[in-house]
Image (cartoon, rainbow, N blue to C red):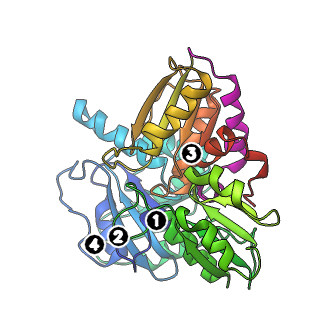
Amino acid sequence: MSLTNTPSANRLHIGIYGKRNSGKSSLINAITNQHTAVISDIPGTTTDPVYKAMEINGIGPCMLIDTAGFDDEGELGRLRVERTQDAVKKTDVAIVVFCDTDIEQESAWISMLREHGIPVIAVVNKSDILTNVSEIAKTIHEHFSLFPVVVSAKEHSGIKNVVEAVIRQLPEDYERKSITGGLVGPGDLVLLVMPQDIQAPKGRLILPQVQTIRDLLDNHCLIMSVATSELDAGLAALAKPPKLIITDSQAFQTVYEKKPPESLLTSFSVLMAAVKGDIHAFVDGSAAIDSLTPDSRVLIAEACTHAPLAEDIGRVKIPRMLRKKVGEQLGVDVVSGPDFPEDLSCYSLIIHCGACMFNRRYVLSRIEKARAQGVPITNYGVALAKLTGILDNISYF
């Protein structure tokens, strides 16, 4: 990711669903006006979901998801459909492509999308060759109460109407609240504490730090940044205490002990928890830490798939702190990237990273899965604040 690109996780995710050879890939090519997706008359050309980052006028930065046909067959087809189902968890707006009046499978998928609270846009493609477009449109309206957009991806007709339909269905939280806007205002002084240790990428900042700095600039704040080792000097150099101190969660204890009483304290991970997920669920879930026993099992879930480093926060530091509190026998499993167990019942607690690489829809789907199975879930920053005994003194609104 370059400094000028919108992170994938911050883009509106638009999923394209339909049967094989319904024209999903052709529709994406028409929307983007590029040869983005491979197209063919052979059903099943698209295998795993293909993610294409785009900037579309009226929508802004978005991620188009080209999925395999949900009528795929055979063992390989079953695996492809599973990948398509996983894409639903990341979808903010769904486009379901129709090309005939047999809507049994579309009905099942639209029901699933609606159960997840995902707005659905119906599109009838191939209007240049279909002779029963009106019949298909009538069937869609009668069964789903949707007015389909009729297009010919091949001839690029009706494509503007698809974009307009997406704009009308934008989620209410698409232009989401500021990362820090509830804590600071114009002219407020904010101190950022960013450890420069082995986990800090050489020559650059990690994504949550970059996003937070940009958000503070948008809120017209005054910003000062220091490494943990320069915290004392940084505070001494200020004419007045900062309104807010944002630290790496690993430095919570050190910063809390040194911060001015009037300064609010939070962390990059806690801010990400409030923006990317459900901060109330994470705070409530952290209470389960007090109920852990040596026989308990904890799942650590990371969004990215970086190579483990010495003193890795998720794989080393948090497990070490948990075992110090609970006992060395405590079981800890770690998953990364899209890996997330279907059956969570064996876990007493899930601790998720800040999820800067996931969009909010995907994080909420994991929270909902944990809630449905009765498993508490929290995140790195909230868990570290809980383990250091300062959670009640952390700000997140």
Span shown in magenta: 270-295
The amino acid beneath tag 4 is Lys
**Which of the two discs, 2 and 1, sits closer to the camera?**
1
Q: The residue tagged with tag 3: helix, strand or loop?
A: helix
**Residue count near mark 4 (Cα–Cα under 10 Å), binned few <14, some 14–19, many ≥20:** some
**Residue count near mark 3 (Cα–Cα under 10 Å), binned few <14, some 14–19, many ≥20:** many
The Cα–Cα distance between marks 2 and 1, rounded to whole angstroms, is 10 Å
- Residue 177 within the magenta-colored segment of the rendering: no
**Which of the two discs, 2 and 4, sits closer to the camera?**
2
Q: Which residue is mark 3?
A: 380
The Cα–Cα distance between marks 1 and 4, rounded to whole angstroms, is 39 Å
**Which of the two discs, 1 and 4, sits closer to the camera?**
1
Q: Are marks 2 and 1 in contact (CB under 8 Å)?
A: yes
The amino acid beneath tag 3 is Tyr
Query: Can you give x and y, in whole percent of width and height, for residue 343 in the image?
Result: 49, 24
The Cα–Cα distance between marks 3 and 2, rounded to whole angstroms, is 24 Å
Instruction: Locate the C terminus by quadrant.
Output: bottom right
Q: Are marks 3 and 4 in contact (CB under 8 Å)?
A: no
The amino acid beneath tag 1 is Leu
Q: Which residue is mark 4?
A: 154
- Residue 271 within the magenta-colored segment of the rendering: yes
Q: 20 or 31, which lies in front?
A: 31
Q: Are marks 3 and 1 in contact (CB under 8 Å)?
A: no
**Which of the two discs, 3 and 4, sits closer to the camera?**
3
Say which label, 3 or 2, has the lower sequence index: 2
Q: Which residue is mark 2?
A: 1
Say which label, 2 or 1, has the lower sequence index: 2
Say which label, 1 or 4, has the lower sequence index: 4
Say which label, 2 or 4, has the lower sequence index: 2
The Cα–Cα distance between marks 3 and 1, rounded to whole angstroms, is 16 Å
**Residue count near mark 1 (Cα–Cα under 10 Å), binned few <14, some 14–19, many ≥20:** some
